[in-house]
Amino acid sequence: MPHALPRLRRATAPAAALTLPRPPAETGIVHLGLGNFHRAHQAVHTAAALRHTDGPWGILGVASHSATVARAMRDQEMAYAVVEISPDDTRVTVPAVHTGALVATEQPDDLLDALAAPATAVITLTVTEHGYTFSPRTGGLDLDAPAVQTDLRGDTPPRTTIGQLVRGLQRRMRTHARPVTVLSCDNLVGNGAQTRRLVHEFAQALPAAERDDLTPWLESAVTFPNSMVDRIVPATTDTYRDAVATHLGLRDTVPVPAEPFSMWVMEDRFAAGRPRWETGGALFTDDVEPYELLKLRLLNGTHSLIAYLGALDGQETIPDATARPFIAEAARAVLHDDYLPTLTVPADIDPDHYIGQLFDRWANTALGHRTRQVGSDGSVKLRQRVPEPALFHLRAGRMPHHLALTVAAYLCCVAPRPGFSPGPHATAMADPAREPLATIAGRSATASGPSFVEAVLDSGLLGDGLRDHPDFAARVSELIDLIVRHGPAAAATDAAGALPTPAHR
């Protein structure tokens, strides 16, 4: 029977495990979103940085709603394992960087105190795109959302991420007003600028006295650097718990699986200091956007197409999906033909090598990243990935067939036509737009083909620009018809065989 993780230094385990550093004594970072990605990415980079230099950079992790990870980490004295896995090797490490774990819904006042604490110099976030409560149509804060309205009233503890941030910063300003950095690590275009915008829009919606007090301080004392994060981190299963037991002789209820690859790019705009993340592998630059778009489009955008086609084809995992020739060919086509021409590749990135790495990462059968996980929350994700590249081509008179295929496959997964079953993996995808899209699909069931897609585009799901291109809606509709009637392979074949026909504006 493996020992529990708190007994790490008394367990019979490899010498490397016994020499792991103890967690920092002081907390300098508060992290919102205590999920697998944070624990396999920012936490790992921070632990690596602290091996090179001391500093008060322990991380207080904050889960939004679920207490599972926070309680397990507390039970395990804040320790957990990261299982880096590939077909050729498995490596298990224990990052020693967290100083505590809270659950925001259970300890709301402790959260605000942590955000306001004088020692807190950096607030980081991985709450997914959906966690920012912004309007898909405008990109601004959804001021009509009931949760945002409740947080603005302030008569109950804040529940939205932006509400928690602003109320914590407000408490900070009123107690000592020390500067702080808010660092988004989510897949949003210009994630720092977007977070800053949402925070300021929330502050502007407060009563005049609060707004006029808070806004100047936000301008002068809080920075919002842009960042790009990249690591594939699947869900935890017993396979990874067993790997920890095998490699370390320890029992861990919440290990994190991850691929060996990890990348973190940031602007160096920190108001109150930071860890020396560059010694832990992070890259600092004055212009994050090229790295960000490279990742959002080539990795994330292509990943979405693989997930939707794979789920519709009955494939449970991304490696299973990419092993299907028609899906691999569609992935290469959307990457090379539709996404890559819209990018300025950073000078230090070899595009051929980068693309080769992507296909190696997607083919990592040891990870088994599930199509349902990658495909979830597409209504928020695709808005970051599809519209601008699609408009780039449409405005030049070209039809981006594989971006149309991405939208068609997504809609077949989360808003299937009555009588069409997309399969269990698509049905299991979580998406906040599933219900409203189903309503649109129901209304359009007996209408002409493109009417459903036109209604979807009119809803603002993918912003406003694509509404002006009815040929794109028609192409998406054609591909939906092929998926419904003949399956995803037929639709992918049609997209691949389409001539570069002009798109009418």
Image (spheres, helix red, strand yellow):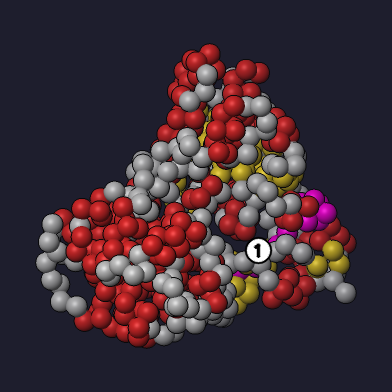
Q: Is residue 341 visible?
A: no
Report the residue that reaches farthest toward the front.
446
**Direction from residue 497 to residue 326 in the image, left or right:** right
User: Where in the figure is residue 210, as x and y percent of width and height?
Assistant: 54, 17
Q: Dot 1, crowdedness within 10 Å: few (<14), some or many (≥20)?
A: many
Relative to 30, say whether 263 is above or below.
Answer: below
Check the picture and name the quadrant holding the N terminus.
Answer: bottom right
User: Based on the displayed image, in which of its 4 quarters is residue 173 positioned?
Assistant: top right
User: Where in the figure is residue 61, as x and y percent of width and height?
Assistant: 67, 45
Looking at the picture, tell me which residue is in the foreground, 371 or 121. Answer: 371
Looking at the picture, tell me which residue is in the foreground, 403 or 118. Answer: 403
Label 1 sits on a secondary structure element that is strand
**Residue drawn at (50%, 72%) of the image:** 426
**Residue drawn at (73%, 71%) of the image:** 241
Amino acid of disc 1: Val
**Direction from residue 31 to residue 189 in the image, left or right:** left
Q: Is residue 440 visible?
A: yes
What range of the chain is rendered magenta? 72-84
User: Where in the figure is residue 65, as x and y percent of width and height?
Assistant: 68, 48
Looking at the picture, tell me which residue is in the foreground, 327 or 192. Answer: 327
**Residue drawn at (46%, 39%) of the image:** 142
User: Where in the figure is residue 85, as x and y percent of width and height?
Assistant: 60, 73
User: Based on the displayed image, in which of its 4 quarters is residue 440 positioned?
Assistant: bottom left
Relative to 175, say whether 18 is above or below.
Answer: below
**Direction from residue 493 to residue 118 in the image, left or right:** right
Q: Which residue is mark 1?
A: 256
